[in-house]
Amino acid sequence: MKKNDVIMIGIIVVIALVALCLVNLYGKWNTKDAQAVVTIDGTEYGRYPLSEDRTVKIESENNGYNLLIIEKGDARIEEASCPDKICVRHKPIDKTGETLVCLPNKVVVEIENGEEADVDASTN
Amino acid sequence: MKKKYQALILGIVVIIFAGILLWHGKNTTKTERFEAQFTDVFDTVTNIIGYGESQETFTRQVSELKEQFDYYNQLYDIYNDYDGVNNIKTINDNAGKEPVKVAPEIIDLLKLGKEAYVETNGQVNIAYGSVLSLWHDYREAGLNSPTKAELPPMEEIEAKAAHTDINQLIIDEEASTVYLADAEMSLDVGSIGKGYAVQKVADYAKAHNMNHLLISAGGNVCVVGAKEDGEGWSVGVQNPDLSSDKEYVQKVKLQDMSIVTSGNYQRYYEVAGKRYCHIIDPDTMMPAEHMASVSVIMKDSGKADAMSTALFNMDYEEGKALVESMDGVEAMWILEDGSIQYSSGFSKYLEK
């Protein structure tokens, strides 16, 4: 084999590796940011990226509301009109599939594209 | 000679690029994992996790399962009437009047209720509706105006408790009718209905070729098969101490199994600073105070639901003796001081 051929093979291998990296990176670029998706009775109400701190007053039927706080990369409900306050007592969430639920107001806050959850479900 | 090398180089190029394409393809064409959620059955949140080639195939499967859930939700409802449906409320409305013709799914549920009563020495009683509804009313009132929250007077509780004899629940399987012989009694299937429905929906899924599925109705979790990669489903047992940073006290791995938890930290009301949960101990006719929570692992979700309620109504020692005397039942207790107790075979489910 001539020297030139070795260089040629080298170049091809480098090109292949670069292509591999690009394919890989493309996948990464395509994943969206983590966000909290709010639905009321199954209908989407809004989506809020976890990367931006904000407060959202989720207004539901009969003057019902849940105060959603997004802070330091996680979401929690600070205050709500429901009597049982189960949603307020719930821990802040930031992992994919985790939810904050207020049944009286039919409000569900779910994380999409967040950190991977370490369990598939929980029992309580 | 030169030509030969060129062919070799070309060959390498083709192989490398084919490799890239294959590798990339493998990552994009496999079935994906999906989740769906609804909030309108059994007064709780229901989650379904499964796999499909596309969102559409999964959504179609979920809507089939949802239809099943809706059906059982109507049948086992004690508060609402539905057009053309005789449900548990219809049975209650006709207490002392006449037998009600019902679907076999109601007969089966009530039979499970009677079995559970016998197996647990009455610690779970679906004929306890009169007492439970009294507590329900006081709890709702207390939650709506916390400063006026109060306990039902004992005389009132005792008067209701006089009408909770499960033997007055008359099931006629042949005629497919149910009759409450005591006009003052009522059924409350809250301790078994949801779990039983989850099992029925899981059975339906399996019969319809959905072989990797997780169904959770308000923490009543039933898994069909394993995950698609063959791993068991991982389920976290929630920490009753909601202020703790540790969300789960334990994690279990399940395959074709159910886990159900009864606890005092989620549904309760407070009277004069003291917490009263929604599960009523038939021995005291008061909210159970034996532990923070108990989780039961059994194959059948309906039985696990009944068993978790029963164990929540017993002290740990008594419950442990019951669990050890039965086959196919494992349990984990979290006591009020945070300590954890396990039945002898529970550890095989613990995540390593």
Image: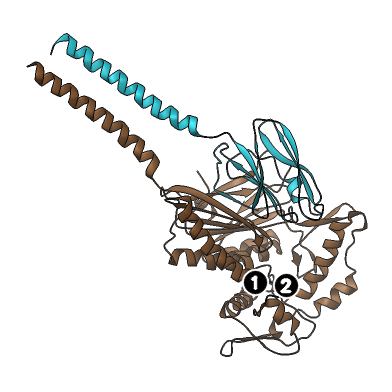
Chain colours: A cyan, B brown
- Tags 1 and 2 touching, CB below 8 Å: yes
Q: Where residue A94 appears, x then y in whole percent?
A: 63, 38
Q: Residue at x 79, y 75 (%)?
A: B130
Q: Which residue is mark 2?
A: B80
Q: Which residue is mark 1?
A: B74
Q: Is residue B273 above or below residue B151?
A: above
Chain for numbered disc 1: B
Work out whether mark 1 precedes mark 2 in sequence or the reverse, and give the earlier one.
1
State which quarter of the image contains the N terminus of chain B.
Answer: top left
Q: Amino acid at mark 1?
A: Gln
Residue B13 tag number:
none
Q: Is residue B146 above or below residue B176?
A: above
Chain for numbered disc 2: B
Q: Nearer the viewer, residue B323 or B89?
A: B89
Q: Residue furthest left?
A: B1
Q: Nearer the viewer, residue B53 or B73?
A: B53
Q: Amino acid at mark 2?
A: Asn
